[in-house]
Amino acid sequence: MAWRKLLARPVFVAVAGSVGKTTAKDLLVGILSTRYSVVANAQSLNVAPEIAKVILRVRPWTRYCVAELGESRPNTLDSMLTLLRPAIAIVTNVGDDHISAFGSRDAIASELCKAVLVVPDSGTVVLNADDPRVAGMANGLKCRVLKFGLTESADIRARDVVCVWPDPLEFTVEYQAQPLRVKTQLYGRQLLTSALAAIGGGLAAGLTLEECAAGIQTVPPAEGRLQLVRHAGITFMRDDFKAPYWTLDPLIEQVAEAQVQRKIFVLGTFSDTQLSKGEVYVHIATKLMEAVDIAVFVGRFSTAALKLSNQENRNRLFAFSRVRDVYDFIQSIHREGDLIVLKGSEKKDHLDRIPMSFSGEVNCWVDDCDRHMFCRECSHVRSHRGLPSVNVLAGTAIRDTQALAENLPRLDEFEQVVIGLGNPGADYEDTPHNVGYAVLDLFAEGVSAPWQAYPDAWVAKGQIIRREGVSRPFCLIKVNSPMNLIGKKLAMLADAMGFGPDQCILVFDDIDYPIGKVKMRMNGSSGGHRGVASVLEAFQTDRIRRIKIVSVRPIHLDPR
């Protein structure tokens, strides 16, 4: 605070908004740097301690200090604005980012408006005319106001916008009846807001429209914000810094318009939605099936997207729990000319490891590590951490099914296959997590079906006599694999024994239900159960019947 009071000559600029503020900040720095010395916060380091660090880097001869401000909860901006005391404030838009903390978009707008209200009468406020909440922030202000957007009432207006892949964003901007064609290095029509905001900031600083356009043209995309990474003839478009749900539709629409041989979309963790996971995943999967050639979902609840899987899109829609498995999958299918879009949350997914791995730079495959940085900055990126490759997809795992088939029984297409989920080994016996094993043991005992031990599983076959006197064959399987990695071996067994996912019934524990509760499902996501997710990923379908059981007491089963 004391140092800020001594800095009378430098002009301080605040850039705020739900999305687009990092790009707007970077573009504005490019514009101002054509004439002045500029200091700004790096990347998206936009919390109070980082703003303090930026101010400490300002010197009396610095002309502009541009600071991106992040709002994560009510009153976040208070301390930052007290330190910064901006003479120019820019607000890009109001979205649903952090809406769970604020409760509504109006509350988010009220927080962002604080950046506008602290600007002195001699300063300038730059606002998005296309966003009613942002445009309304001009009410009652005595300082200069510049509004930007596509609407005719905007002071800085864009028209003739072109942005269809592989061409970058290009548009004509009009200011004071002067039109000028602006070319950028940006990809994505949604970045037009950031470009116009930066031009507004440049004009507020006294630069000409020509200087603003020239400055913008020199700035590449910010890391993880529609940033291009090219390798071996394929192009990754990284939009993996964050993924608020409300930003997905514009990106999907952009990819749908792309003129390219093949489009692959990888979606990780998204945030800020009040819809159920099932509704959200199905909605997104539906849109992606219309927009791209291959859609890949990754994350703990990604298998919810498999509800949309059917015969028509069986080879177009995939879901995985782990980013490592996505990399293996992409590595196995990519071809020259592909456009691969990566959309996710840097803190949860670290999807940047996928393009990095094409150069052999990644050994760390920990998921959900909660480190708020890109992997190229992380000291662990070359450390061998996380689970090894699993090759979970049925039909792609390296295995000798012929050798297995020589020992295992073959099943007919009508035979029901009941798989008990559990962990092999004495340490896991009689634990709640091994309910699947225990249920099958009791059932086999009740119907006198003896267990046969094989290297990869224990198998019991028998017959159930129905009331009508008709016998129905069944097969019980306890896979000799840790529960969370069961999918690969079950896929191997399915190949060797000749059964499909439609014949399977999974029996497993579920801690989300009351003790003693039993629930049946015909399909659906894994519900976060890693063992079930492993199976759904191996077969890439959610149409597998399952029985959930919770018990911490001995299980009593009537074999009838």
Image: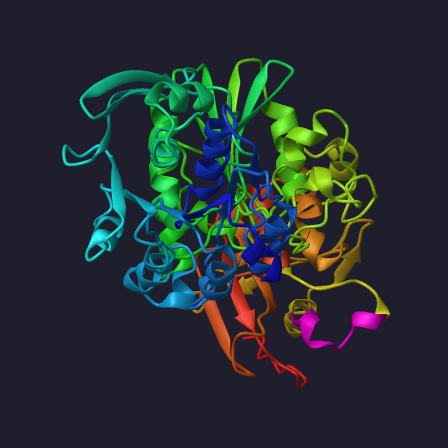
Count of numbered badges drawn on the protein: 0
Q: Quadrant of residue 200?
A: top left
Q: Is residue 346 above or below residue 341?
A: below
Is 432 colored magenta in this rendering? yes
Q: Give the range drawn in magenta.
A: 427-435
Residue 60 place in picture, x, y as percent: 60, 43
Residue found 62% across the figure and 81% down from its top: 551
Image-based side of 513 in relation to 496, left or right: left
Query: What secondary structure is the magenta-colored segment mainly?
Result: helix
- Residue at 77% x, 39% y is 404
Asked if residue 272 is among those painted magenta in the image, a careful observer would answer no
Residue extending farthest to the left is: 152
Instruction: Give the x, y percent position of residue 53.
Output: 64, 52
Relative vertical location of residue 99 with respect to residue 95 in this rendering, above or below: below
> At 70% from the left edge and 25% from the top edge, which residue is drawn?
358
Residue 238, how many percent across, how many down? 54, 33
Residue 118, given in percent of the width and then of the height, sits at: 37, 59
In this view, 400 is above or below 85 = above
Picture quarter with the N terminus: bottom right
**Closer to the camera, 7 or 275?**
7
Q: Is residue 347 in sight in this rendering?
A: no
